[in-house]
Amino acid sequence: MKRSILLLGTAIVAACASSPASTGRWAGQPVEFFTRTANAPDEWATRGVAGVAPSGDWLSQFNDPLMVGLVNEALTNSPTLESRAALVRASEASTRVARAQRRPSVSASASAGVTSTENTFGGSSDRNTDGIYGVGLDASWELDLWNRLGSGIGAAEADYAASQADFAAAELSIAAQTAIAWINLNEALAQERVAVLTFEARDRVRTLTERRFQRGLADALDVRTARSTVAQAEASIAARRQITGETARRLETLVGRYPSAELDAPAEIPTLDVIVPEGNPALLLSRRPDIAGAEARIAAAGLRAEQARLAMLPSLRLTASASTSTTEFSDAFDPEKIAANLIASLVQPLFTGGRLDAQRDAAVAQAEAAVANYAAAALDAWREVENALAADILLAKQEEAQVRAVEEASLAEELAERQYTSGTVTIFNLIDSQTRRLTAESQLVAARASRASNRVAYHLALGGGLPSGTAGAQYGTNNIDTDAAAGGRS
Protein backbone atom coordinates (compact mmCIF):
# COMPACT_ATOMS: atom_id res chain seq x y z
CA MET A 1 0.00 0.00 0.00
CA LYS A 2 2.81 2.38 0.84
CA ARG A 3 4.49 1.61 -2.46
CA SER A 4 1.25 2.43 -4.28
CA ILE A 5 1.00 5.77 -2.51
CA LEU A 6 4.62 6.53 -3.39
CA LEU A 7 4.15 5.72 -7.07
CA LEU A 8 0.93 7.74 -7.21
CA GLY A 9 2.58 10.76 -5.60
CA THR A 10 5.55 10.57 -7.93
CA ALA A 11 3.31 10.34 -10.97
CA ILE A 12 1.34 13.41 -9.90
CA VAL A 13 4.50 15.46 -9.39
CA ALA A 14 5.99 14.25 -12.67
CA ALA A 15 2.86 15.36 -14.46
CA CYS A 16 3.12 18.80 -12.86
CA ALA A 17 6.80 19.09 -13.66
CA SER A 18 6.22 18.16 -17.28
CA SER A 19 4.04 21.20 -17.80
CA PRO A 20 6.07 24.46 -17.96
CA ALA A 21 2.93 26.52 -17.74
CA SER A 22 2.01 24.95 -14.40
CA THR A 23 4.62 26.93 -12.45
CA GLY A 24 3.29 30.15 -13.90
CA ARG A 25 -0.26 29.29 -12.86
CA TRP A 26 0.67 28.40 -9.30
CA ALA A 27 3.54 30.74 -8.46
CA GLY A 28 3.62 33.48 -11.08
CA GLN A 29 5.98 33.89 -14.00
CA PRO A 30 9.73 33.16 -13.66
CA VAL A 31 11.86 36.15 -12.64
CA GLU A 32 15.14 37.12 -14.23
CA PHE A 33 17.29 40.22 -13.80
CA PHE A 34 20.11 41.67 -15.87
CA THR A 35 22.62 44.48 -15.50
CA ARG A 36 21.48 47.88 -16.68
CA THR A 37 23.57 51.02 -17.21
CA ALA A 38 23.58 54.21 -19.22
CA ASN A 39 24.88 53.90 -22.76
CA ALA A 40 28.69 53.88 -22.66
CA PRO A 41 30.59 55.94 -25.28
CA ASP A 42 33.36 54.39 -27.33
CA GLU A 43 36.04 56.60 -25.77
CA TRP A 44 36.68 58.75 -22.73
CA ALA A 45 35.11 62.17 -23.08
CA THR A 46 38.14 63.95 -21.61
CA ARG A 47 41.09 62.37 -23.37
CA GLY A 48 40.00 59.86 -25.99
CA VAL A 49 40.96 56.19 -25.90
CA ALA A 50 44.05 54.05 -26.34
CA GLY A 51 42.07 50.96 -27.29
CA VAL A 52 44.09 48.63 -25.06
CA ALA A 53 43.61 47.34 -21.55
CA PRO A 54 45.39 49.27 -18.78
CA SER A 55 48.75 47.97 -17.60
CA GLY A 56 48.91 46.37 -14.21
CA ASP A 57 52.35 47.70 -13.26
CA TRP A 58 51.18 51.22 -12.48
CA LEU A 59 53.58 51.72 -9.55
CA SER A 60 56.62 51.62 -11.83
CA GLN A 61 55.93 55.11 -13.20
CA PHE A 62 56.76 56.57 -9.78
CA ASN A 63 60.24 54.99 -9.89
CA ASP A 64 60.11 54.58 -6.11
CA PRO A 65 61.19 51.22 -4.64
CA LEU A 66 60.27 52.46 -1.15
CA MET A 67 56.66 52.95 -2.27
CA VAL A 68 56.53 49.43 -3.74
CA GLY A 69 57.98 47.99 -0.53
CA LEU A 70 55.38 49.74 1.61
CA VAL A 71 52.55 48.54 -0.67
CA ASN A 72 53.85 44.98 -0.28
CA GLU A 73 54.00 45.40 3.48
CA ALA A 74 50.45 46.73 3.61
CA LEU A 75 49.09 43.87 1.50
CA THR A 76 50.84 41.37 3.77
CA ASN A 77 49.88 42.85 7.14
CA SER A 78 46.56 44.62 6.57
CA PRO A 79 43.87 43.56 9.11
CA THR A 80 41.27 44.74 6.60
CA LEU A 81 42.46 42.16 4.07
CA GLU A 82 42.52 39.47 6.76
CA SER A 83 38.89 40.28 7.51
CA ARG A 84 37.97 40.18 3.81
CA ALA A 85 39.76 36.86 3.36
CA ALA A 86 37.81 35.41 6.27
CA LEU A 87 34.56 36.58 4.66
CA VAL A 88 35.57 34.84 1.42
CA ARG A 89 36.13 31.59 3.34
CA ALA A 90 32.78 31.99 5.08
CA SER A 91 31.05 32.56 1.74
CA GLU A 92 32.72 29.48 0.26
CA ALA A 93 31.48 27.45 3.22
CA SER A 94 27.97 28.78 2.62
CA THR A 95 28.05 27.41 -0.92
CA ARG A 96 28.83 23.98 0.49
CA VAL A 97 25.89 24.35 2.86
CA ALA A 98 23.62 25.19 -0.06
CA ARG A 99 24.85 22.24 -2.16
CA ALA A 100 24.29 19.87 0.77
CA GLN A 101 20.55 20.59 0.67
CA ARG A 102 20.29 18.61 -2.59
CA ARG A 103 21.83 15.54 -1.01
CA PRO A 104 20.15 12.95 1.21
CA SER A 105 20.61 13.29 4.95
CA VAL A 106 21.12 10.21 7.12
CA SER A 107 21.21 10.03 10.92
CA ALA A 108 21.68 7.17 13.34
CA SER A 109 20.38 6.78 16.88
CA ALA A 110 20.73 4.40 19.79
CA SER A 111 18.62 4.19 22.92
CA ALA A 112 18.63 2.32 26.19
CA GLY A 113 16.06 2.44 28.95
CA VAL A 114 14.23 0.56 31.69
CA THR A 115 10.55 -0.37 32.02
CA SER A 116 8.96 -1.33 35.32
CA THR A 117 5.59 -3.10 35.45
CA GLU A 118 3.58 -4.42 38.40
CA ASN A 119 1.71 -7.71 38.00
CA THR A 120 -1.09 -8.73 40.42
CA PHE A 121 -2.02 -12.43 40.69
CA GLY A 122 -3.96 -14.24 43.40
CA GLY A 123 -3.91 -11.30 45.77
CA SER A 124 -0.16 -10.85 45.51
CA SER A 125 1.76 -8.40 43.38
CA ASP A 126 5.09 -8.65 41.65
CA ARG A 127 7.10 -5.88 39.93
CA ASN A 128 9.10 -6.72 36.84
CA THR A 129 11.92 -4.48 35.63
CA ASP A 130 13.21 -5.00 32.08
CA GLY A 131 15.73 -3.20 29.98
CA ILE A 132 14.76 -1.81 26.54
CA TYR A 133 17.35 -1.36 23.83
CA GLY A 134 17.02 0.04 20.36
CA VAL A 135 18.92 1.32 17.35
CA GLY A 136 17.60 3.39 14.49
CA LEU A 137 18.56 4.78 11.13
CA ASP A 138 16.67 7.68 9.51
CA ALA A 139 17.11 9.11 6.02
CA SER A 140 15.40 11.88 4.13
CA TRP A 141 15.77 13.44 0.70
CA GLU A 142 13.91 16.25 -1.03
CA LEU A 143 13.60 15.95 -4.78
CA ASP A 144 14.39 19.29 -6.42
CA LEU A 145 11.36 19.22 -8.70
CA TRP A 146 11.36 22.84 -9.82
CA ASN A 147 15.07 23.67 -9.29
CA ARG A 148 14.23 25.62 -6.14
CA LEU A 149 17.22 24.17 -4.34
CA GLY A 150 19.32 24.70 -7.46
CA SER A 151 18.41 28.39 -7.42
CA GLY A 152 19.59 28.61 -3.83
CA ILE A 153 22.87 26.95 -4.78
CA GLY A 154 23.34 29.40 -7.65
CA ALA A 155 22.63 32.33 -5.34
CA ALA A 156 25.22 31.09 -2.83
CA GLU A 157 27.80 30.67 -5.60
CA ALA A 158 27.07 34.19 -6.81
CA ASP A 159 27.56 35.45 -3.26
CA TYR A 160 30.91 33.64 -3.23
CA ALA A 161 31.93 35.38 -6.46
CA ALA A 162 30.86 38.72 -4.96
CA SER A 163 32.97 38.10 -1.84
CA GLN A 164 35.99 37.34 -4.03
CA ALA A 165 35.38 40.58 -5.91
CA ASP A 166 35.14 42.46 -2.61
CA PHE A 167 38.49 41.00 -1.58
CA ALA A 168 40.12 42.09 -4.85
CA ALA A 169 38.61 45.57 -4.48
CA ALA A 170 39.93 45.79 -0.92
CA GLU A 171 43.41 44.84 -2.11
CA LEU A 172 43.39 47.57 -4.74
CA SER A 173 42.08 50.06 -2.21
CA ILE A 174 44.77 49.18 0.36
CA ALA A 175 47.51 49.45 -2.30
CA ALA A 176 46.19 52.83 -3.47
CA GLN A 177 45.74 54.16 0.07
CA THR A 178 49.30 53.16 0.92
CA ALA A 179 50.73 54.78 -2.19
CA ILE A 180 48.80 57.99 -1.54
CA ALA A 181 49.80 57.99 2.15
CA TRP A 182 53.45 57.69 1.08
CA ILE A 183 53.00 60.65 -1.27
CA ASN A 184 51.31 62.60 1.51
CA LEU A 185 54.21 61.88 3.88
CA ASN A 186 56.70 63.14 1.31
CA GLU A 187 54.56 66.22 0.78
CA ALA A 188 54.34 66.85 4.53
CA LEU A 189 58.12 66.61 4.89
CA ALA A 190 58.63 68.85 1.86
CA GLN A 191 56.23 71.41 3.32
CA GLU A 192 58.07 71.16 6.63
CA ARG A 193 61.30 71.88 4.76
CA VAL A 194 59.70 74.95 3.19
CA ALA A 195 58.65 76.07 6.69
CA VAL A 196 62.27 75.72 7.88
CA LEU A 197 63.48 77.73 4.87
CA THR A 198 60.87 80.33 5.74
CA PHE A 199 62.25 80.57 9.27
CA GLU A 200 65.81 80.92 7.98
CA ALA A 201 64.79 83.63 5.54
CA ARG A 202 62.86 85.53 8.20
CA ASP A 203 65.79 85.24 10.59
CA ARG A 204 68.15 86.67 7.99
CA VAL A 205 65.85 89.66 7.63
CA ARG A 206 65.74 90.07 11.41
CA THR A 207 69.54 90.05 11.62
CA LEU A 208 69.83 92.51 8.76
CA THR A 209 67.20 94.80 10.28
CA GLU A 210 68.81 94.81 13.73
CA ARG A 211 72.15 95.76 12.16
CA ARG A 212 70.52 98.55 10.22
CA PHE A 213 68.82 99.69 13.42
CA GLN A 214 72.17 99.84 15.23
CA ARG A 215 73.54 102.00 12.42
CA GLY A 216 70.47 104.26 12.53
CA LEU A 217 69.19 103.12 9.11
CA ALA A 218 66.02 101.42 10.45
CA ASP A 219 63.56 102.26 13.14
CA ALA A 220 62.07 100.18 15.98
CA LEU A 221 58.98 99.37 13.88
CA ASP A 222 61.15 97.50 11.38
CA VAL A 223 62.83 95.53 14.17
CA ARG A 224 59.54 94.55 15.77
CA THR A 225 58.11 93.56 12.41
CA ALA A 226 61.13 91.39 11.60
CA ARG A 227 61.01 89.65 14.99
CA SER A 228 57.26 89.04 14.58
CA THR A 229 57.78 87.27 11.25
CA VAL A 230 60.44 85.05 12.85
CA ALA A 231 58.00 83.99 15.58
CA GLN A 232 55.32 83.28 12.99
CA ALA A 233 57.80 81.09 11.07
CA GLU A 234 58.56 79.15 14.26
CA ALA A 235 54.83 78.51 14.77
CA SER A 236 54.53 77.36 11.16
CA ILE A 237 57.34 74.82 11.66
CA ALA A 238 55.55 73.37 14.70
CA ALA A 239 52.27 73.11 12.78
CA ARG A 240 53.98 71.40 9.84
CA ARG A 241 55.70 68.91 12.13
CA GLN A 242 52.37 68.02 13.67
CA ILE A 243 50.97 67.28 10.20
CA THR A 244 54.07 65.23 9.36
CA GLY A 245 53.65 63.11 12.49
CA GLU A 246 49.97 62.46 11.85
CA THR A 247 50.69 61.56 8.22
CA ALA A 248 53.46 59.16 9.23
CA ARG A 249 51.19 57.46 11.77
CA ARG A 250 48.50 57.08 9.13
CA LEU A 251 50.95 55.31 6.82
CA GLU A 252 52.35 53.14 9.61
CA THR A 253 48.82 52.02 10.47
CA LEU A 254 48.14 51.08 6.86
CA VAL A 255 51.26 48.89 6.64
CA GLY A 256 50.50 47.21 9.97
CA ARG A 257 53.14 48.91 12.11
CA TYR A 258 52.71 50.55 15.48
CA PRO A 259 51.92 54.26 14.84
CA SER A 260 55.06 55.78 16.37
CA ALA A 261 55.71 58.39 13.65
CA GLU A 262 59.19 56.93 13.11
CA LEU A 263 58.74 56.27 9.38
CA ASP A 264 60.89 58.63 7.35
CA ALA A 265 60.77 59.68 3.71
CA PRO A 266 63.06 61.61 1.33
CA ALA A 267 60.56 64.49 0.98
CA GLU A 268 60.61 64.11 -2.81
CA ILE A 269 57.51 64.35 -5.00
CA PRO A 270 57.75 62.55 -8.37
CA THR A 271 57.50 64.54 -11.58
CA LEU A 272 55.09 62.65 -13.84
CA ASP A 273 54.45 62.53 -17.56
CA VAL A 274 51.03 63.22 -19.03
CA ILE A 275 48.45 60.46 -18.55
CA VAL A 276 48.01 58.19 -21.55
CA PRO A 277 44.31 57.20 -21.66
CA GLU A 278 43.82 53.44 -21.43
CA GLY A 279 40.86 51.28 -22.29
CA ASN A 280 37.37 52.68 -22.75
CA PRO A 281 34.19 53.00 -20.66
CA ALA A 282 32.82 49.63 -21.77
CA LEU A 283 36.10 47.84 -21.01
CA LEU A 284 36.21 49.45 -17.58
CA LEU A 285 33.10 47.55 -16.46
CA SER A 286 34.85 44.23 -17.08
CA ARG A 287 37.93 45.25 -15.08
CA ARG A 288 36.68 46.85 -11.88
CA PRO A 289 36.26 44.35 -9.04
CA ASP A 290 33.49 46.39 -7.42
CA ILE A 291 31.53 46.21 -10.68
CA ALA A 292 32.11 42.45 -10.80
CA GLY A 293 30.81 42.24 -7.25
CA ALA A 294 27.72 44.30 -8.10
CA GLU A 295 27.02 42.05 -11.09
CA ALA A 296 27.36 38.92 -8.96
CA ARG A 297 24.92 40.40 -6.43
CA ILE A 298 22.37 40.91 -9.20
CA ALA A 299 22.68 37.22 -10.05
CA ALA A 300 22.36 36.22 -6.39
CA ALA A 301 19.33 38.45 -5.79
CA GLY A 302 17.62 37.26 -8.97
CA LEU A 303 18.12 33.62 -8.06
CA ARG A 304 16.77 34.21 -4.57
CA ALA A 305 13.72 35.88 -6.06
CA GLU A 306 13.20 32.82 -8.25
CA GLN A 307 13.74 30.57 -5.23
CA ALA A 308 11.08 32.48 -3.29
CA ARG A 309 8.67 32.09 -6.22
CA LEU A 310 9.33 28.35 -6.49
CA ALA A 311 8.66 27.94 -2.77
CA MET A 312 4.96 28.36 -3.62
CA LEU A 313 5.01 25.10 -5.64
CA PRO A 314 4.58 21.54 -4.29
CA SER A 315 7.56 19.82 -2.72
CA LEU A 316 8.24 16.09 -2.64
CA ARG A 317 10.19 14.58 0.21
CA LEU A 318 11.19 10.96 0.71
CA THR A 319 11.79 9.70 4.24
CA ALA A 320 12.90 6.27 5.35
CA SER A 321 13.60 4.79 8.76
CA ALA A 322 14.69 1.50 10.23
CA SER A 323 14.70 0.73 13.95
CA THR A 324 14.60 -1.98 16.57
CA SER A 325 13.20 -2.05 20.09
CA THR A 326 13.86 -5.09 22.27
CA THR A 327 14.44 -6.08 25.87
CA GLU A 328 17.62 -7.96 24.96
CA PHE A 329 20.65 -5.92 24.00
CA SER A 330 21.89 -8.60 21.61
CA ASP A 331 18.56 -8.52 19.76
CA ALA A 332 18.89 -4.79 19.04
CA PHE A 333 21.11 -5.60 16.05
CA ASP A 334 19.17 -8.62 14.84
CA PRO A 335 18.02 -8.02 11.23
CA GLU A 336 14.85 -10.02 11.90
CA LYS A 337 13.86 -7.50 14.59
CA ILE A 338 14.18 -4.44 12.34
CA ALA A 339 11.04 -2.49 11.54
CA ALA A 340 11.35 -0.27 8.41
CA ASN A 341 9.17 2.14 6.53
CA LEU A 342 9.43 4.38 3.47
CA ILE A 343 7.20 7.41 3.04
CA ALA A 344 6.82 9.85 0.17
CA SER A 345 5.13 13.12 1.10
CA LEU A 346 3.85 15.67 -1.39
CA VAL A 347 3.17 19.08 0.16
CA GLN A 348 1.46 21.98 -1.59
CA PRO A 349 1.17 25.26 0.34
CA LEU A 350 -2.47 26.38 0.35
CA PHE A 351 -2.74 29.15 2.91
CA THR A 352 0.21 30.80 4.68
CA GLY A 353 -1.32 34.12 5.57
CA GLY A 354 0.40 35.80 2.63
CA ARG A 355 3.86 34.90 3.92
CA LEU A 356 5.09 33.27 0.72
CA ASP A 357 3.72 36.08 -1.45
CA ALA A 358 5.42 38.64 0.76
CA GLN A 359 8.72 36.74 0.67
CA ARG A 360 8.59 36.58 -3.12
CA ASP A 361 7.79 40.30 -3.41
CA ALA A 362 10.59 41.18 -1.00
CA ALA A 363 13.08 39.07 -2.95
CA VAL A 364 12.02 40.70 -6.23
CA ALA A 365 12.42 44.15 -4.70
CA GLN A 366 15.89 43.20 -3.43
CA ALA A 367 16.86 42.11 -6.94
CA GLU A 368 15.56 45.37 -8.40
CA ALA A 369 17.66 47.24 -5.83
CA ALA A 370 20.74 45.23 -6.88
CA VAL A 371 20.19 46.23 -10.52
CA ALA A 372 19.91 49.89 -9.52
CA ASN A 373 23.04 49.61 -7.36
CA TYR A 374 24.94 48.18 -10.33
CA ALA A 375 23.89 51.10 -12.52
CA ALA A 376 24.98 53.57 -9.83
CA ALA A 377 28.34 51.78 -9.39
CA ALA A 378 28.96 51.91 -13.15
CA LEU A 379 28.24 55.64 -13.28
CA ASP A 380 30.52 56.24 -10.31
CA ALA A 381 33.30 54.23 -11.99
CA TRP A 382 33.05 56.27 -15.19
CA ARG A 383 32.94 59.50 -13.21
CA GLU A 384 36.07 58.59 -11.26
CA VAL A 385 38.06 57.94 -14.44
CA GLU A 386 36.82 61.09 -16.19
CA ASN A 387 37.58 63.17 -13.07
CA ALA A 388 41.11 61.77 -12.89
CA LEU A 389 41.78 62.42 -16.59
CA ALA A 390 40.47 65.98 -16.38
CA ALA A 391 42.30 66.66 -13.11
CA ASP A 392 45.62 65.54 -14.58
CA ILE A 393 45.37 68.17 -17.31
CA LEU A 394 44.60 70.96 -14.87
CA LEU A 395 47.13 69.82 -12.27
CA ALA A 396 49.83 69.70 -14.95
CA LYS A 397 49.02 73.29 -15.84
CA GLN A 398 49.12 74.25 -12.16
CA GLU A 399 52.50 72.58 -11.72
CA GLU A 400 53.93 74.32 -14.78
CA ALA A 401 52.64 77.71 -13.65
CA GLN A 402 53.95 77.21 -10.11
CA VAL A 403 57.42 76.41 -11.45
CA ARG A 404 57.44 79.77 -13.24
CA ALA A 405 56.06 81.45 -10.12
CA VAL A 406 58.91 80.07 -7.98
CA GLU A 407 61.52 81.24 -10.49
CA GLU A 408 60.13 84.76 -10.72
CA ALA A 409 59.52 85.05 -6.97
CA SER A 410 63.12 83.97 -6.23
CA LEU A 411 64.49 86.66 -8.54
CA ALA A 412 62.15 89.24 -7.00
CA GLU A 413 63.29 88.29 -3.49
CA GLU A 414 66.97 88.70 -4.43
CA LEU A 415 66.24 92.11 -5.89
CA ALA A 416 64.20 93.21 -2.87
CA GLU A 417 66.95 92.12 -0.45
CA ARG A 418 69.54 94.16 -2.34
CA GLN A 419 67.28 97.18 -2.44
CA TYR A 420 66.42 96.87 1.26
CA THR A 421 70.12 96.68 2.10
CA SER A 422 70.70 99.86 0.11
CA GLY A 423 67.68 101.50 1.75
CA THR A 424 65.60 102.01 -1.40
CA VAL A 425 62.68 99.81 -0.25
CA THR A 426 61.07 99.16 3.12
CA ILE A 427 61.12 95.98 5.19
CA PHE A 428 57.54 95.37 4.15
CA ASN A 429 58.62 95.12 0.50
CA LEU A 430 61.27 92.55 1.44
CA ILE A 431 58.91 90.50 3.61
CA ASP A 432 56.30 90.56 0.86
CA SER A 433 58.75 89.27 -1.72
CA GLN A 434 59.89 86.51 0.62
CA THR A 435 56.29 85.53 1.32
CA ARG A 436 55.55 85.30 -2.39
CA ARG A 437 58.54 83.08 -3.04
CA LEU A 438 57.90 80.77 -0.08
CA THR A 439 54.18 80.55 -0.89
CA ALA A 440 55.02 79.64 -4.48
CA GLU A 441 57.34 76.88 -3.31
CA SER A 442 54.69 75.51 -0.97
CA GLN A 443 52.06 75.58 -3.71
CA LEU A 444 54.43 73.84 -6.13
CA VAL A 445 54.89 71.02 -3.61
CA ALA A 446 51.12 70.77 -3.13
CA ALA A 447 50.46 70.73 -6.90
CA ARG A 448 52.98 67.95 -7.52
CA ALA A 449 51.63 65.90 -4.61
CA SER A 450 48.04 66.37 -5.80
CA ARG A 451 49.01 65.24 -9.28
CA ALA A 452 50.81 62.16 -7.95
CA SER A 453 47.84 61.25 -5.72
CA ASN A 454 45.49 61.79 -8.65
CA ARG A 455 47.60 59.41 -10.74
CA VAL A 456 47.12 56.70 -8.12
CA ALA A 457 43.39 57.46 -8.01
CA TYR A 458 43.29 57.15 -11.81
CA HIS A 459 44.73 53.63 -11.77
CA LEU A 460 42.44 52.68 -8.90
CA ALA A 461 39.48 53.96 -10.93
CA LEU A 462 40.61 51.89 -13.92
CA GLY A 463 40.39 48.76 -11.78
CA GLY A 464 43.72 47.46 -13.03
CA GLY A 465 45.31 44.49 -11.31
CA LEU A 466 47.93 44.87 -8.64
CA PRO A 467 51.45 45.46 -9.95
CA SER A 468 53.57 42.38 -10.52
CA GLY A 469 55.81 41.64 -7.58
CA THR A 470 53.41 42.88 -4.93
CA ALA A 471 52.33 40.58 -2.14
CA GLY A 472 48.72 40.27 -3.23
CA ALA A 473 49.15 40.19 -7.00
CA GLN A 474 47.91 36.60 -7.15
CA TYR A 475 44.50 37.81 -5.90
CA GLY A 476 44.12 40.51 -8.55
CA THR A 477 40.94 41.24 -10.49
CA ASN A 478 41.91 38.90 -13.30
CA ASN A 479 41.55 35.97 -10.87
CA ILE A 480 38.08 36.77 -9.59
CA ASP A 481 35.94 33.64 -9.82
CA THR A 482 32.97 35.02 -11.74
CA ASP A 483 32.15 31.58 -13.17
CA ALA A 484 29.99 30.90 -10.11
CA ALA A 485 27.85 33.93 -10.81
CA ALA A 486 27.58 33.05 -14.48
CA GLY A 487 26.69 29.48 -13.65
CA GLY A 488 24.01 30.63 -11.25
CA ARG A 489 22.29 32.62 -14.01
CA SER A 490 22.16 29.73 -16.45
Image (spheres, helix red, strand yellow):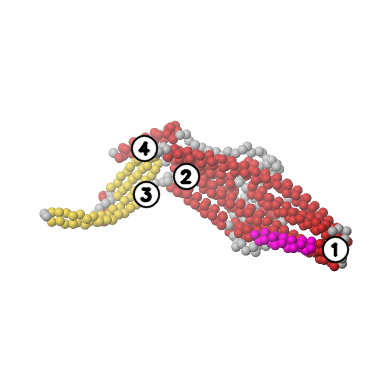
The first of marks 2 and 3 along the sequence is 3
View extreme (bottom): residue: 214
Can residue 146 be seen in this snapshot? no
The disc placed on residue 10 is: 4
- Give residue 135's position: percent from left, percent from top: 30, 52
| Badge 1: residue crowd in 10 Å (few <14, some 14–19, many ≥20) | some
Q: Nearer the viewer, mark 4 or mark 2?
A: 2
Q: Is residue 430 above or below residue 396?
A: below
| Badge 4: residue crowd in 10 Å (few <14, some 14–19, many ≥20) | some
Which residue corresponds to mark 2?
Answer: 153
Q: Nearer the viewer, mark 3 or mark 1?
A: 1
- Give residue 489's position: percent from left, percent from top: 51, 40
Q: CA distance from mark 1 to mark 4?
A: 111 Å
The first of marks 3 and 1 along the sequence is 3
The part of the image, by quadrant, that contains residue 63 is bottom right
Identify the magenta region: 224-246
Determine whether label 3 and label 1 are within 8 Å by CB: no
Q: CA distance from mark 2 to mark 1?
A: 87 Å
Which residue corresponds to mark 3?
Answer: 106
Which residue corresponds to mark 1?
Answer: 218
Determine whether label 2 and label 3 are within 8 Å by CB: no
Residue at horizontal 51%, vertical 37%?
Answer: 32
What is the three-letter code of the residue carrying label 2? Ile
